[in-house]
Amino acid sequence: MIVMASRKEIVIALFLALPLLTAAMKNEMEQGFFPEPSTESGGPRDKLSESHSAIWTELSRCNVKYNDDSLTFSIIDTPAVMALRGTIVTVSGFVLPLDGTSYTKHFLLMRRTPFGVRFAPSEPNEIIEIMMGRHIAWTKDMTTVSGSLSLINNAEKGIFFEITNASVKRAAPQK
């Protein structure tokens, strides 16, 4: 049996359902779409879901510009960041694997979690490309990496910082 509703009945039904839909959407946004990773201390994730490593503050002071004509990024490094070139740094962040497996040795370390639609993504000056000698198990939890910082200028990819000869201080077990 097919029941036909008038436009007026449809509008009334939508109007009555709106508070329920709004409440459900609000609850979903508060609960998140993905399981919450832990913070650097291993406790529940803070609301901003970002690393508070001091190096991120320095890197984020670099001025990044986007060129609409060439569709590329550019960066002006601060003197403090230029002084870090070639030094061993330690930074915590979230791993975004680039080699497509559950074990990775080439990944992006991001200041903010890339897991969840309610969180703003990291800016280009809040992303470090990591190159490791051996694989680590991917985790969505905060990971701490140490290694030699290089200032690179990959305008196409919008990657400006790289850590080579990296080692992981805290993450899932290494392979």
Image (cartoon, rainbow, N blue to C red):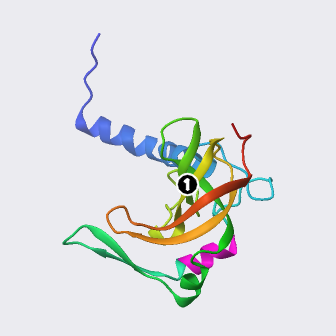
Q: Is residue 78 placed above or below 105 in the rendered structure?
A: below
Span of residues in magenta: 52-59
**Residue 86 seen anywhere in this rendered image of the structure:** yes
**Residue 115 seen anywhere in this rendered image of the structure:** no
Q: Name the image quarter holding residue 148.
A: bottom right
Q: Is residue 97 placed above or below 159 in the rendered structure?
A: above
Q: Name the image quarter holding residue 172.
A: top right
Q: Quadrant of the N terminus?
A: top left
On screen, residue 136 versus residue 69, left or right, reads: right
Q: Is residue 53 magenta?
A: yes
Residue at numbered disc 1: 131
Q: Residue at x 31, y 35 (%)?
A: 9
On screen, residue 14 versus residue 171, left or right, reads: left
Q: Is residue 49 placed above or below 83 in the rendered structure?
A: above
Residue 31 percent coordinates (x, y): 63, 47
Q: Is residue 1 placed above or below 127 in the rendered structure?
A: above
Residue 131 percent coordinates (x, y): 55, 54
Q: Is residue 139 magenta?
A: no
Judging depth in this view, the residue of 46 and 130 nearest the camera is 130
Predominant SS along the magenta part: helix
Q: Residue at x 73, y 51 (%)?
A: 38
Judging depth in this view, the residue of 22 and 120 nearest the camera is 120
Q: Residue at x 35, y 76 (%)?
A: 74
* Identity, as a three-letter code, of the amino acid under mark 1: Met
Residue 80 percent coordinates (x, y): 59, 87
